[in-house]
Image (cartoon, rainbow, N blue to C red):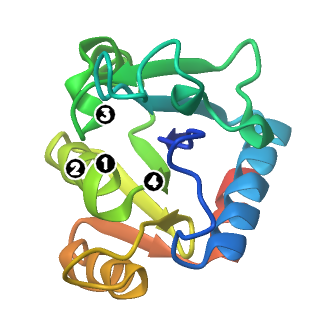
Amino acid sequence: MILLVIDMQKGLVDDDLYAFDLFMDRTAQLVAAARKNKVEVIFVQHDAGSGSGMSAGDEAFEIIDELRPEPDEKVFVKTINSCFGNRDFKAYLEQQEDKRLMIIGLQTNYCIDATVKSAFERGFEVIIPEGTNSTFDNDYMTGETTYRYYNEDVWEELINAVTFEEAIKLLEE
């Protein structure tokens, strides 16, 4: 199994995210559990392009201090919503025998959604722990409604939805 941590960047992590405190606590606990149990952790950062304020070299582009990658952990950069848009990331995952991806991070309706669908299409078992992805309110839905819409409806046949406690146990196996 790989724990895939998507877009936990200074420019996106904000207390306006749906269920912010719970989301942050669970994300940190899963990263810590993966590290403790020698489960590979991969971070992916979104580069919105030069001049966007969220590109390599910008403070907003950096992964938050609370989750700073360890020296031996891989970090990939993407320029589209799906992590699979990065060819090196895609090639690396295709080499792995274990086809289980536990996906956490931001934002539910953008990069998490695109990556879930891309991973499923490529034959990965996609594991989504409860409360470990989040998003902001938008013009059409609240962050909570958006979270529930994707986690409980859109991805219903694509993911293995697990409780937070089940996710910890999977990382301990």
Residue at horizontal 29 percent and vertical 15 percent from the top: 91
Residue denoted by label 3: 83
Q: Quadrant of residue 129?
A: bottom right
State which quarter of the image contains the N terminus: top right
Mark 4–mark 1 distance (CA, rounded to whole Å): 7 Å
Q: Disc 1 residue type?
A: Cys
Residue denoted by label 2: 114
Mark 3–mark 4 distance (CA, rounded to whole Å): 12 Å
Callouts 3 and 1 close, C-beta under 8 Å? yes
Q: Earlier in the sequence, mark 3 or mark 2?
A: 3
| Of marks 3 and 4, the one in the foreground | 4
Mark 3–mark 2 distance (CA, rounded to whole Å): 8 Å
Q: State the mark number for residue 106.
A: 4
- x and y percent of residue 96 in the render? 41, 24
Residue denoted by label 1: 111
Mark 1–mark 2 distance (CA, rounded to whole Å): 5 Å
SS assignment at label 2 = helix
Callouts 3 and 2 close, C-beta under 8 Å? yes
